[in-house]
């Protein structure tokens, strides 16, 4: 039984625009189910948890990365599967699962190919995709929302570029597995489950650090949205572990899938809690 | 003079310590390790180890194939090949199966050549 959790605010109201088409598509694929709509932050966690209690075995996020992450935190069953129909402003999780559009999301759901991942805990929050600090985490707070005119977008890009160029790197210390300690000047730092990036790799924390990108790299980064995946490609340091302690001087905000959840210092660890995602392709 | 390589890494299963990054303690990885920063501790890899021209390690290195272009104070144990490049400065002993030392490499220590392990089944089992 499929349980669809729709975030009506995702993708600037994209759900409202596509909802009739979406329901028809799912019905034609034989995977209709119950549809519910979130009413605010954290609601998807509550709804997912209720759905599991009711006996649903497939919970589908119709939204972006924040919606998916909320559902991850609400699905406590090892046997339930999570699907994604990407309609958010940021759909990196879906992209990593091999899903690039809501239409493809429907066909992937119907095929029901499953890959299991270990979740990462940061304080009381669980995640799979990305925990970040640094430039990209500070960007949403420091930059006003752009108006959608060409002039507005150009001005926003210029302001973002200047922000990136003048961004002061952060002194970070990362203790890994009670073994070694890494000290670095950080422009951006991202923690993910490396299996999520490379399906043939084992479940392990992967920490990537970007120091100071060049002007050209900053330009390319901003044109592509300045998000974790783009920054990961610029990383100059990368290491793995089962648990890390992240400290910064001065303390700084930490975000999970774009949502600020805590400040440093923060303990992050790979857990035994598993999440099963419906993916485009299973890699043996 | 060799130019510092520009390290650009994808998030993945290899360990890469970039320029300016400092590591205190024993660094280990099941895969490959590339170091262009400073490490104060032993480095152990299930795969290959590469020390870039900006890399400095104060500790022993143990891996399969080991390429050194930076500064090392410590012993080297390679189950495969050890390559000291022209920019290498190594103070320590080497135990390896194969070795290449480029002209200009700075090396103070001894080399112990290990015999290659037999890849064929033991004759006694035939």
Image (cartoon, rainbow, N blue to C red):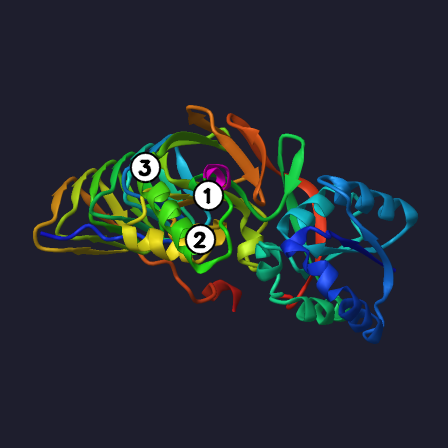
Q: Earlier in the sequence, mark 2 or mark 1?
A: 1
Q: Which residue is mark 3?
A: B21
* Camera-side residue of B115 and A201: A201
Task: Check the residue under mark 2 and report the chain it is in.
Answer: A
Residue bounds of the magenta highlight? A136-142
Can residue B86 be seen here? The reply is yes
Dot 2 crowding, Cα within 10 Å, few <14, some 14–19, many 20+: few
- How far apart marks 2 and 1 lie (CA) works out to 20 Å
Counting from the top left corner in percent of width and height, residue B4 is at: 19, 50
The N terminus of chain A: image quadrant = bottom right
Mark on residue A136? 1
Q: How many numbered marks, from 0 up? A: 3
Q: Residue at x 73, y 51 (%)?
A: A7
* Camera-side residue of A135 and A95: A135
Counting from the top left corner in percent of width and height, residue A208 is at: 44, 45
Q: Residue at x 56, y 44 (%)?
A: A258
Dot 3 crowding, Cα within 10 Å, few <14, some 14–19, many 20+: many
- How far apart marks 1 and 3 lie (CA) works out to 20 Å
The answer to whether A34 is drawn above or below residue A205 in the figure is below
Element at label 2: helix
Q: Residue at x 67, y 70 (%)?
A: A104
Mark on residue A152? 2
- Quadrant of the rendered image containing residue A186: top left
Element at label 1: helix
Dot 1 crowding, Cα within 10 Å, few <14, some 14–19, many 20+: many
Task: Check the residue under mark 3 and report the chain it is in.
Answer: B
Which dot, 2 or 1, sits closer to the camera?
A: 2
* Camera-side residue of A19 and B64: A19
The answer to whether B27 is drawn above or below residue A22 in the figure is above
> Do tag 3 and tag 2 residues touch (Cβ < 8 Å)?
no
């Amino acid at each position: 039984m499929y349980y669809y959790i729709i975030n009506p605010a995702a993708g600037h109201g994209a759900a409202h625009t596509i909802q009739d088409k979406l329901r028809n598509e799912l019905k034609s694929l034989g995977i209709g189910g119950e549809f519910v709509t979130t009413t605010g932050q954290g609601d998807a966690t509550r709804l997912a948890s209720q759905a599991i209690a009711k006996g649903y075995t497939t919970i589908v996020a119709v939204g972006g990365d924040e919606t998916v992450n909320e559902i991850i935190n609400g699905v406590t069953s090892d046997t339930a599967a999570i699907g994604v129909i990407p309609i958010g402003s940021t759909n990196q999780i879906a992209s990593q699962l091999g899903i690039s559009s809501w239409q493809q999301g429907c066909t992937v759901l119907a095929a029901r190919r499953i890959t299991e991942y270990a979740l990462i805990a940061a304080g009381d929050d669980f995640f799979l995709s990305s925990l970040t600090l640094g430039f990209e985490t500070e960007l949403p707070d420091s930059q006003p929302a752009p108006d959608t005119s060409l002039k507005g977008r150009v001005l926003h890009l210029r302001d973002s570029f200047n922000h990136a160029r003048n961004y002061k790197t952060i002194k970070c210390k990362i203790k890994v597995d009670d073994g070694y300690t890494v000290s670095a000047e950080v422009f951006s730092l991202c923690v993910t489950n490396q299996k999520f990036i490379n399906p043939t790799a084992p479940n392990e924390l992967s920490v990537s650090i970007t120091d100071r990108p060049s002007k050209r790299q900053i330009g390319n980064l901003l044109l592509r949205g300045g998000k974790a995946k783009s920054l990961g490609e610029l990383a100059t340091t990368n290491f793995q572990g089962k648990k890390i302690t992240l400290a910064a001087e001065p303390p700084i905000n930490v975000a999970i899938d774009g949502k600020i959840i805590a400040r440093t210092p923060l303990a992050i660890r790979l857990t035994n809690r598993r999440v099963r995602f419906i993916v485009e392709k299973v890699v043996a | 003079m060799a130019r510092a390589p520009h390290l650009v890494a994808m998030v993945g299963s290899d360990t890469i310590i970039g320029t300016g990054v400092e590591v205190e303690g024993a660094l280990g990885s099941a895969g490959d390790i590339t170091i262009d920063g400073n490490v104060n501790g032993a480095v152990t890899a299930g795969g290959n180890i590469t020390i870039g021209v900006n890399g400095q390690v104060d500790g022993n290195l143990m891996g399969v194939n080991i390429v050194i272009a930076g500064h090392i104070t410590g012993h080297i144990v390679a189950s495969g090949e050890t390559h000291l490049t022209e920019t290498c400065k190594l103070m320590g002993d080497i135990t390896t199966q194969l070795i290449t030392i480029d002209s200009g490499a700075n090396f103070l220590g001894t080399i112990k050549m290990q015999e290659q392990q037999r890849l064929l089944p033991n004759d006694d089992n035939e």
